[in-house]
Image (cartoon, rainbow, N blue to C red):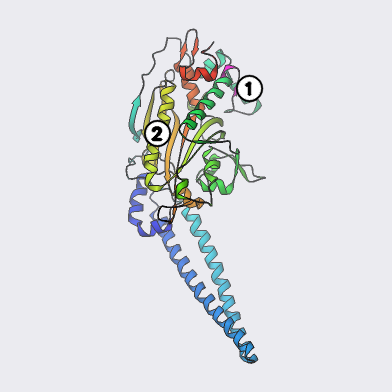
Amino acid sequence: MLQLSYLRENREKAIELLAIKNFTRTDLIDKVIRLDDKRRETQKSLDENLSQANAMAKEIGMFFKTGKIEEAKLMKEKTTAFKKVSKELSEVLDQTSRELNKLLLEIPNIPHPSVPKGNTEEDNELIEEEGSKPELFASALPHWDLAKKYDIIDFDLGSKVTGAGFPFYKGKGAKLQRALINYFLDKALEAGYIEYQPPLFVNEASARGTGQLPDKEGQMYHITEDNLYPIPTAEVPITNIYRDQLLGFEDLPVKNAAYSNCFRREAGSYGKEVRGLNRLHQFDKVEIVQIQHPEKSYDTLEEMRKHVSSLLRDLELPFRILKLCGGDLGFTSAMTYDFEVYSAVQKKWLEVSSVSNFENFQTNRMKLRFKDENGKNRLAHTLNGSALALPRIVAALLENNQTEKGIRIPKALIDYTKFEIID
């Protein structure tokens, strides 16, 4: 959520930068400013009214002490009117504040000035590309056929037991999943992150705190009876650890990592883009999260980008990094790098990670502050990244490493899988 002070003091700049995200609701920003004016005026009137009422209460006390009973009674009658006005003003203030907060939740984060303009993923900026696309033998198979051939992932069984998008991993497929999770977690710990195992469900306040609500309400599963949400990413519970907290200057940066199942409805997804592991409703992911000093957050973003690059390099996967354009940038993000690996059989790039800086958008919602070097309370910056999401990593590993004798395991993973080939 954007700070009111920023919108008031930088209206034109905010409108200009939000246009990069193709957000053109200037009427919404103006309405927010008008409501804030009303809130301030109402608060001022309420404070003045309460001040007068308090002064009259003191006078009543003095009248009673000095035996001026009639004067005290007359003054008490006057205070009744002040109480009525105070109640009315309090109701107006509460209603105005609720409406103001609701509108603020509809305004996306301001993009960083370096974010390229554009409408779709075609307009994203290519930052770098690394690795060679493998040349496979003529009868090479897509990963969904490899899964069946080597009996390592059962999509039909998942559909039977739950539904499409909930596969079973078995045998060496299950071991590969576990190996990747442990490998990603170990690499995060080497990089200085603290490991957490978070809850898989969060309450509404947590989902709102990191910006999933109201923006992605239709994309999340919702347990209505308990008003809980299965998490779409470990970012949500991990970042919300610090909701309503004041951190010390010495506490930064906070570096946490977590493995979790992730749950996404993926409403509206269909066709070949969702085949096999390309798009699932339940999947595994290791997430890295940082809370950082505002003046250091973009250096931290580059550090996290390098961390994810090193994982893909170790897995011997060809990958590229894109800086998302305004039209492809998420609601809560100020800047995002997307990582894609190349699928040699599908002959396309598959997104496997997003690394984002949210600046103070989430911390303003969560009331997450830190005491800076000058003793001043300030909003921290939050960042997170997938390091990594497993489904498309597994898809690329299976497809790119297949041989006529089996599927080769990258050297970096052998100590974790305890086997060198799936055959």
Residue 230 vs 247, above or below: the answer is: above
Asked if residue 278 shows in the view, the reply is no
**Res 151 quadrant in image:** top right
| Amino acid on which disc 2 is placed | Arg
Which mark sits nearer the N-terminus, 2 or 1?
1
Q: Secondary structure at mark 1?
A: helix
Tag of residue 305: 2
Q: Nearer the viewer, mark 2 or mark 1?
A: 2
The picture places residue 407, in percent across and down from the top left corner, at 49, 13
Residues in magenta?
A: 167-173
Q: Residues within 10 Å of mark 1 (few under 14, many from 20)?
A: some
Q: Quadrant of the C terminus?
A: top right
Residue 170 colored magenta? yes
For the view shown, which residue lies furthest in the right direction? 225
Q: Nearer the viewer, residue 370 or 111?
A: 370
Residue 104 vs 202, above or below: the answer is: below
Residue at the (55%, 30%) spot, across then down:
283
The picture places residue 211, in percent across and down from the top left corner, at 50, 46
Tag of residue 157: 1
Residue 258 vs 66, above or below: the answer is: above
Tag of residue 230: none
Horizontal side of 385 relative to 112 (left or right) equals right
| Amino acid on which disc 1 is placed | Leu
Residue 188 colored magenta? no
The picture places residue 113, in percent across and down from the top left corner, at 32, 45
Q: Residues within 10 Å of mark 2 (few under 14, many from 20)?
A: many
Q: CA distance from mark 2 to mark 1?
A: 37 Å
Q: Secondary structure at mark 2?
A: helix
Q: Nearer the viewer, residue 379 or 47?
A: 379
Residue at the (34%, 39%) spot, across then down:
118
The picture places residue 170, in percent across and down from the top left corner, at 60, 19
